[in-house]
Image (cartoon, rainbow, N blue to C red):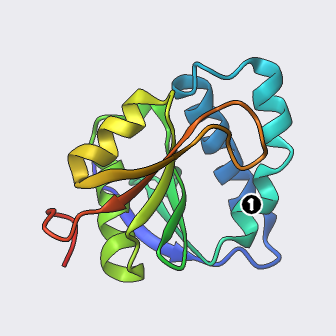
């Protein structure tokens, strides 16, 4: 299966935003097992604005043009990275991360400590934990690991 990465701007077209939110939901429901359905619904209310406001947004599309993953970067911070669960483990996360690092200078990411798969993914790519917060950005009791890309990792220039 062929995939392509492209930077996009949402503008006034809500079609792509709906696709991104659907991808977010599918990904979170499959990977964020520490969240309750109520937690997911509460967070979902903020997702469209979070996606629309990120400085750089790149999507991964399959051969049919469907969004199967996306990454958002603001400055050097990776604000979001989500892959449709049916395609996890196929290298799409690494493709999007390569793009964010090479095209947008991404070197930082905050990861839910309870999302062990994401912590492992970023660690394997070359990120290391440099700090920890007891709560997430909304003040909820979901500890956050603050990670940065090691200069000698495969993902850095």
Q: Quadrant of the C terminus?
A: bottom left
- Across and down, in percent, residue 124 comes to 22, 44
Depth check, front residue: 114 or 58: 114
10 Å crowding of disc 1: few (<14), some (14-19), many (20+): few
Depth check, front residue: 22 or 55: 55
- Across and down, in percent, residue 152 comes to 13, 67
**Direction from residue 6 to residue 18 in the image, left or right:** right
**Direction from residue 51 to residue 3 in the image, left or right:** left
Would residue 17 be visible to someone looking at this image?
yes
Depth check, front residue: 31 or 86: 31
Point 36% across, 81% down: residue: 103
From this view, report whether residue 6 is shown above or below residue 134.
Answer: below
- Across and down, in percent, residue 127 comes to 29, 54
- Across and down, in percent, residue 3 comes to 34, 57
From this view, report whether residue 86 is shown above or below residue 128.
Answer: above
Point 81% across, 61% down: residue: 49
Point 29% across, 66% down: residue: 98
Residue under pointer 1: 50
Point 71% across, 50% down: residue: 137
From this view, report whether residue 49 is shown above or below residue 68.
Answer: below
């Amino acid at each position: 299966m062929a995939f392509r990465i492209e930077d996009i701007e949402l503008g006034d077209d809500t079609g792509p935003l709906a696709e991104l939110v659907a991808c977010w939901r599918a990904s979170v429901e499959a990977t964020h097992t520490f969240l309750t359905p109520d937690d997911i619904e509460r967070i979902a209310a903020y997702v469209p604005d979070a996606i629309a406001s990120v400085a750089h947004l790149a999507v991964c599309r399959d051969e049919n043009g469907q969004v199967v993953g996306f990454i958002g970067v603001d400055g050097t911070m990776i604000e979001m990275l989500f892959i449709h669960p049916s395609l996890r483990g196929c290298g799409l996360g690494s493709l999007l991360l390569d793009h964010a690092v090479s095209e947008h200078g991404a070197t930082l990411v905050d990861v839910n400590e309870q999302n062990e798969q994401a912590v492992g993914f970023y660690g394997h790519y070359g990120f290391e934990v440099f700090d920890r917060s007891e709560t997430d950005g909304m003040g909820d009791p979901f500890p956050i690991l603050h990670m940065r890309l090691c200069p000698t990792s495969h993902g850095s220039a």
